[in-house]
Image: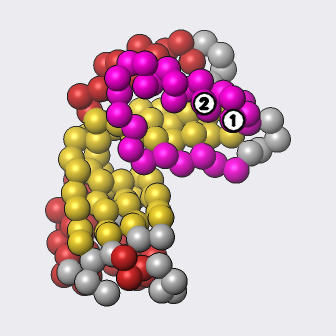
Amino acid sequence: MKPTINVSEDITLVILQNIPSDISFVTDVFNNIAAMDVDVDMISLSPAQSSQTSLSFTISDEDLVKILGYTRKLNDNSIKVIVSSGNCKISIDDDGMENCPGVAARVFSVAAKANTDIRLITTSEDQISLLVTKSDFDTTYAALTSELG
């Protein structure tokens, strides 16, 4: 495996807790965000806990003010909004990951050895993306590059 490691800086994590466990609600969230011309990157929907769930996604720090205006409205509906800006995304890309057991374990092992504060993980067949705090970025990136690159 010879992956490509890509980096994005100045990323904001938005977490919406206690949202209705209803795909129509999630659709409305992303339609409203799209109407603000905000690009969403990493998305994670937690398994439903009865009638509620949590939704996490990332945006550019540049769009933080737009999102805060929107999320203030959601806070009025007993939805808890958590926003964390100034993060970095590290993506490990490799077409050889598909049907190759242990790649995620290897990436997470490297991050654990670097004592990384991981805020969000998303994956696909050929990509693992880690959202890390800016303070952990240099150490984590160096460790991943050394171990995987």
Q: Is residue 43 magenta?
A: yes
In the image, taking residue 142 as reference, residue 64 lies left or right, namely right
- Residues under numbered marks 1 and 2 in contact, where contact means CB atoms less than 8 Å apart: yes
The image quadrant where one finds the C terminus is bottom left
In the image, taking residue 23 as reference, residue 30 lies left or right, namely left
Which three-letter amino acid code belongs to the residue tagged 1?
A: Ile
Is residue 102 visible from the viewing direction of this image?
no
Q: Residue at x 49, y 20 (%)?
A: 32
Q: Which residue corresponds to mark 1?
A: 23
Is residue 20 visible from the viewing direction of this image?
yes
Q: Which residue corresponds to mark 2?
A: 27
Residue 16 found in image quarter: top right
x then y, percent, for residue 79: 62, 25
Q: Residue at x 17, y 62 (%)?
A: 138
Q: What range is drawn magenta here?
A: 20-47
The image quadrant where one finds the N terminus is bottom left
x then y, percent, for residue 47: 70, 50
Q: Residues within 10 Å of mark 1 (few under 14, many from 20)?
A: few
Q: Nearer the viewer, residue 148 or 81?
A: 148
Element type at mark 2: helix
Q: CA distance from mark 1 to mark 2?
A: 6 Å
Q: Residue at x 59, y 24 (%)?
A: 28
Element type at mark 1: helix
